[in-house]
Image (cartoon, rainbow, N blue to C red):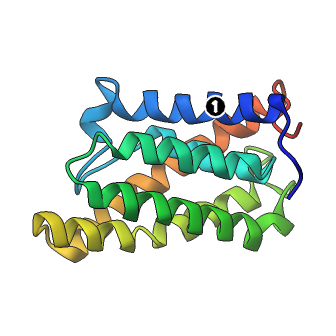
Amino acid sequence: MKKQTVRDLTHIAIVAALYVVLTIVPPFNLISYGPYQFRIAEMFNLLGFYNRKYIIAVTLGCVIANFFSFNMIDVVVGSLSTLVFVGSGVYFFDRFKNQDILGGLLDKAHVYFAFYFSFFMVTIAAELTLVTQAPFWATWFTVALGELASLLVGAVLIKKLAKVIDFVS
């Protein structure tokens, strides 16, 4: 891994801070935790396709945001899930990057990643079932659906933002 510059560390800090704000600040906090969640900040997971430093940023943001959740288990399980599945998803689907679909509205890599990452919300559903006795299948469905929605909406936004913001450097 290349040595991080001050610029890289600043980008990591900014994305991590944005993730935290979009997760813990009202009214976002009302929809960011529990068996029915829609974390808007999850769209930042897609930045890993532009530069791997953002995998660190999103993981750090998730760690900090999960300190505000109902349980310390969420800090470990949620954050490790983010690190493992964002990292592996970017690795698996990077070859589909810059392949436009739906008239250029979305990137094929982002769409594949959204379904992949949403499927692995099984870890969060298992955690919530263990901690809150929430029904596993219903929780997995609702958490995965919220994740998928956040990532697909985020895919459109991130693609548009990438035209005016250089996420690569």
Residue 14 against residue 91 in the figure, above or below: above
Residue at 66%, 40% in the rendered image: 156
Residue neighbourhood size for the residue with mark 1, other residues' Cα within 10 Å, grouped as few (<14), some (14–19), many (≥20) = some
Residue 102 visible from this viewpoint: no
Residue 4 against residue 130 in the figure, above or below: above
Quadrant housing the N terminus:
bottom right
Displayed quadrant of residue 22: top left
Quadrant housing the C terminus:
top right
Q: Position of residue 66 (x, y in %)?
A: 36, 46
Is 99 positioned to the left or the right of 70 in the image?
A: right
Of residue 24 and residue 120, the one placed in the foreground of this image is: 24
Residue 154 against residue 109 in the figure, above or below: above
Is 135 positioned to the left or the right of 107 in the image?
A: left
Is 109 positioned to the left or the right of 14 in the image?
A: right
Displayed quadrant of residue 35: bottom left
Residue 93 visible from this viewpoint: yes
Residue labelled with disc 1 = 13
Residue at 74%, 61% in the rendered image: 109
* Residue type, label 1: Ala
**Judging from the image, what secondary structure is the residue with disc 1 in?**
helix
Q: Position of residue 78 (x, y in %)?
A: 40, 59
Residue at 48%, 64% in the rendered image: 80
Q: Position of residue 133 (x, y in %)?
A: 10, 69
Q: Position of residue 102 (x, y in %)?
A: 73, 52
Residue at 72%, 28% in the rendered image: 10
